[in-house]
Amino acid sequence: MIEPIKYLNKISPLSQGAIHSLSELFRPTILKEEEFFLEEGKYAKEIGFLESGVARAFFVNTEGKEYNKQFFVGPTLIGAYTSLLTKQKNKIAQKTLTECKIWKASFSEIELLYTRFHDFEKLQSIIF
């Protein structure tokens, strides 16, 4: 079982079918230090599992000053949940502070699994 699935299964148990289907959606990637997972003003399309590394969520005020909103330290989930759910542009950028191993999955593909596996709905309600 890949790391994101192990992590999610601990939050809320998933059926074997859900585990198999979800495993097919995640793909690993490496982001170097100071790379964006998601920029401000873009539409969020992916959810990520930060296996290792450190990232931050931040916004920039009208004077150009950056303010940290949240830090992500692996292992944890990463993503612009508000943008994913509302389908509106992201307002909070997410950028790596160190090299990060992140497993990415298309949120729209995950949403398609909700009708087949109701355990995803419970998982989403716990996470969000």
Image (cartoon, helix red, strand yellow):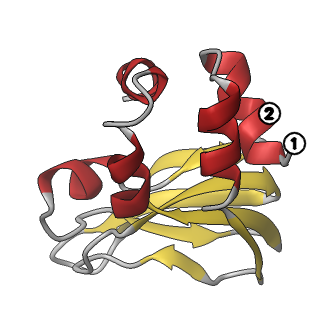
Residue at the spot 83% in from the left edge and 74% down from the top edge:
99
Quarter residue 62 falls in: bottom left
Q: Which mark is residue 87?
A: none
Q: Mark 1 = which residue? A: 1
Residue 78 spot, x, y in % from top left: 55, 51
Q: Amino acid at mark 2?
A: Lys
Q: Secondary structure at mark 1?
A: loop
| Camera-nearest residue between 71 and 23 | 23
Q: Quadrant of the N terminus?
A: top right
- Marks 1 and 2 close (CB-CB < 8 Å): yes
Residue 20 spot, x, y in % from top left: 70, 44
Residue at the spot 70% in from the left edge and 52% down from the top edge:
23
Residue 29 spot, x, y in % from top left: 75, 77
| Camera-nearest residue between 80 and 125 | 125
State left or right for residue 56 relative to residue 91: right
In this view, the mark in front (1 or 2): 1
Above/below status of 40 relative to 67: below
Give the number of marks: 2
Quarter residue 120 falls in: top left
Label 2: how many Cα within 10 Å (few below 14, some 14–19, many 20+): few
Above/below status of 88 relative to 2: below
Q: Amino acid at mark 1?
A: Met
Above/below status of 58 relative to 61: above
State left or right for residue 117 relative to residue 121: right
Q: Earlier in the sequence, mark 1 or mark 2?
A: 1
| Camera-nearest residue between 72 and 66 | 72
- The CA distance from mark 1 to mark 2 is 6 Å
Label 1: how many Cα within 10 Å (few below 14, some 14–19, many 20+): few
Quarter residue 102 falls in: bottom right
Q: Secondary structure at mark 2?
A: helix
Q: Quadrant of the C terminus?
A: top left
Q: Mark 2 = which residue? A: 6
